[in-house]
Image: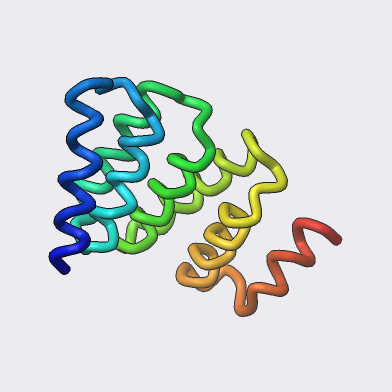
Amino acid sequence: MWQIDEAVDQYKRPLQLKPRNAMVHNNLGLILQKKRQIKEASSCYEKALEIKPQFAIALNNLGDAMSESGRLDEAISYHENALEIKPNYAHAFNSLGNSLQKKGLVTKQSSITKMRFG
């Protein structure tokens, strides 16, 4: 766990110099999410989206955080928004399938693929 704590510190340093770096906020969110600090991770993704509203990666990561915390309707919305921006974004597509499956709307990942690609 100390390596993750060190990584958090490594990402906070550049933010002191360039606080409007959306990618660094997003990456810090990923690290915090690995530490199970979902609320803090979500704040990082939201900050990234304030800076760069069309940032599909941050939208999808925020969706993953919402899904992890059981907020499935919000998660689905974020995943769908990411796919609107970047329609071939495989990770967002997979995340959407996972969130829909958690909600009980599909029973298999292949069902999503069939719906999306025919």
Question: 85 or 28, which is in the foreground?
Answer: 28
Tell me where residue 71 sits by quadrant: bottom left
95 w.r.t. 54: above or below: below
Q: Position of residue 6 (x, y in %)?
A: 16, 54
Question: 88 or 27, which is in the foreground?
Answer: 27
Residue name at image x 57 percent, y 68 percent: 105
Q: Quadrant of the N terminus?
A: bottom left
Q: Position of residue 84 (x, y in %)?
A: 64, 37
Residue name at image x 35 percent, y 26 percent: 21
Residue name at image x 41 percent, y 58 percent: 72
10 w.r.t. 7: above or below: above
Residue name at image x 56 percent, y 58 percent: 96
Q: Position of residue 114 (x, y in %)?
A: 79, 66
Q: Position of residue 29 (x, y in %)?
A: 29, 46
User: For this view, does 1 lie left or right of residue 56?
Assistant: left
**Outermost residue toward the right in this view:** 118
User: For this view, does 94 lie left or right of residue 37?
Assistant: right
Q: What coloring was used for the rendering? A: rainbow
Q: Quadrant of the C terminus?
A: bottom right
Count the numbered circles shown: 0
User: For this view, does 81 lie left or right of residue 10?
Assistant: right
